[in-house]
Amino acid sequence: MRIVIAKPGLDGHDRGAKVVARALRDGGHEVIYTGLRRTPEQIVRTVLDEDADLLGLSSLSGAHAFLFPRVCQLLIEADCQEVTVFGGGIIPMDERSELFDVGMRAIFGPGTKMEEMTDFVSEVENRIHSGDPVGVGEGGDWVWQNGA
Amino acid sequence: MEIGFGKTERDRLNEELLQKAMAGNRRALAKLLSAVEEGDVNAETLGLKNHLDDGTIIGVTGAPGVGKSCLIEKLLSHWSNQGLKVGVIAVDPSSPLSGGALLGDRIRMESADSNPNVFVRSFATRNQPGGLPVAVGLASNLMRNSGYDIVLIETVGAGQAEIRIVSFADRVVLIESPSRGDLIQAEKAGMMELADLIIVNKSDLEGAERAASEIQTALEISGKPPPVLLASAKNGEGIEEFASKLKSLPVKSGAEMARARERLLAAWDSALLSRDDISDIINGLIKEDSNAEDWVKENLRWSNG
Ligand SMILES: Nc1nc2c(ncn2[C@@H]2O[C@H](COP(=O)(O)OP(=O)(O)O)[C@@H](O)[C@H]2O)c(=O)[nH]1
Ligand SMILES: [Mg+2]
């Protein structure tokens, strides 16, 4: 799969995003990392031009509450509704359902094993092959059950 | 599924995408580039015009870390300021173990996700020695047909497959840096033969001028040396000269010949490796099956003169 890993917002730590990028590469995927401090518009532009299947968003500083939904909305406007969006970082449990509501399919907390993330990507691939909705704008209520 | 005169559903979809891409739709171009990468685009069926060697497809090659991506960013802003649209194909190696790849050239190209006159696409080599060079050739042609005035192909100039990739460019620029002995590496890889221009990047660093004159001296032995220029992606020095030199480059017959040869070999590789029965042939050869050996003799007869 082609996966964009992006870091919206202003905080300057991208060690986590880089670890995820490398783990997905080692899982056999083609990973495009966008670098620090990207705006939602810039992230969507990268997903669009690179024709990515998935987009992983990383946030440590509360950027998720506003920026993740914004990215999802812009993706749909850019005709990228079939792109699967997932998130990672420090995102409180009680704020996750809002993110699922805007079309995100998984949220991974700080302690997530890399294996779980590659399992998630495989599951997305399977679902695409069998025609089940996984994209940010494709509806359906499937989300990844953490640790399941 | 066959429809009409040998056109498949896929071909019709590609035609539709091409129409949209030519009208400036980024999503359609991106989808078509994926199809090219998957080997799902037949240039002939698509009715794509052959690219005329007019110097607008430029290969940028050199060892990792010499500053290819940073220099490309400088060219992107230089040309887009002049109102030109520029496409980039950035090729990075796939891991031979996992098959995955980290495609990181965009990070160095700030225009990639903000300048509307720029389209950057990352390609992984996917360990397919036969198909990729031909695919990159087709992809650059597609970008040219979709309104991009210039296309840059970035690749690490090591290994036969990657040399073959840049051979699909009209002109090839070899990037060096002062801090390393890349010249020898490039020479070994056969890169010098293909280069029309050599840029010694990082001219802001100690030793750049000395490196440039060493390269010049080394090349003089070879007869028709390409021009050698100094530049710095860091402070912008030499970028304008670099860009204008690219425009005025004469076609060197030596480099021209070398490129034509690499393209021919790439087309041959690709045709051979994309045969449906290629694994049968290879298995046959392993088992010393006389049918497979006859096939090789029959089809490669002319190779022995
Ligand atoms: N000092 C100096 N550093 C540079 C220059 N151009 C690039 N670099 C640095 O060289 C490193 C590699 O650059 P990059 O463009 O990614 O190289 P590539 O692997 O050839 O594409 C980066 O850390 C850049 O900041 C330059 O002109 N001067
Ligand atoms: Mg690079």
Image (tube, helix red, strand yellow):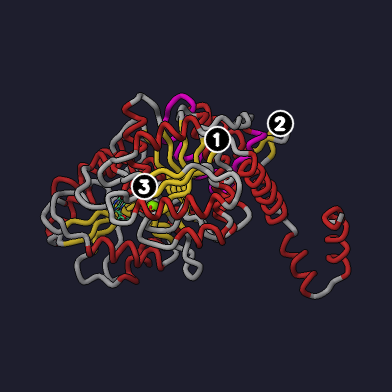
Binning the other alpha carbons within 10 Å of mark 2 as few (below 14), some (14 to 19) or many (20 upward) gives few
- Residue beneath the point at 49% across and 30% down: B248
- The disc, 1 or 2, on the residue closer to the chain's N-terminal end is 2
- Determine the CA span between mark 2 and mark 3: 33 Å
- Asked whether the viewer can see residue A138, the reply is no
The verdict on residue B40 being magenta is: yes
Residue B46 rendering spot, x and y as whole percentages: 62, 32
Q: Amino acid at mark 3?
A: Val
Q: Nearer the viewer, residue A132 or A59?
A: A59
- Asked whether the viewer can see residue B249, the reply is yes
Residue B37 rendering spot, x and y as whole percentages: 53, 48
Q: Do the residues at pointers 1 and 2 share their chain?
A: yes
The verdict on residue A45 being magenta is: no
Q: Nearer the viewer, residue B95 or B33?
A: B95
- Determine the CA span between mark 1 and mark 2: 26 Å
Q: Amino acid at mark 1?
A: Asn
| B202 vs A112: above or below | above
Label pair 3/1, CB-CB below 8 angstroms: no
Binning the other alpha carbons within 10 Å of mark 1 as few (below 14), some (14 to 19) or many (20 upward) gives many
Binning the other alpha carbons within 10 Å of mark 3 as few (below 14), some (14 to 19) or many (20 upward) gives many
Q: Nearer the viewer, residue B32 or B229?
A: B229
Q: Do the residues at pointers 3 and 1 share their chain?
A: no
- Residue beneath the point at 16% across and 51% down: A64
Range covered by the magenta-colored residues: B21-45
- Say which mark, if any, is on residue B141: 1
On-image quarter of the C terminus of chain B? bottom right
Q: Chain of mark 2?
A: B
Q: Amino acid at mark 2?
A: Gly
Does the beta carbon of the residue at mark 3 sit less than 8 Å from ligand 2?
no
**In the picture, residue B224 is in which quadrant?**
top right
Q: Chain of mark 3?
A: A
Residue B189 rendering spot, x and y as whole percentages: 56, 59
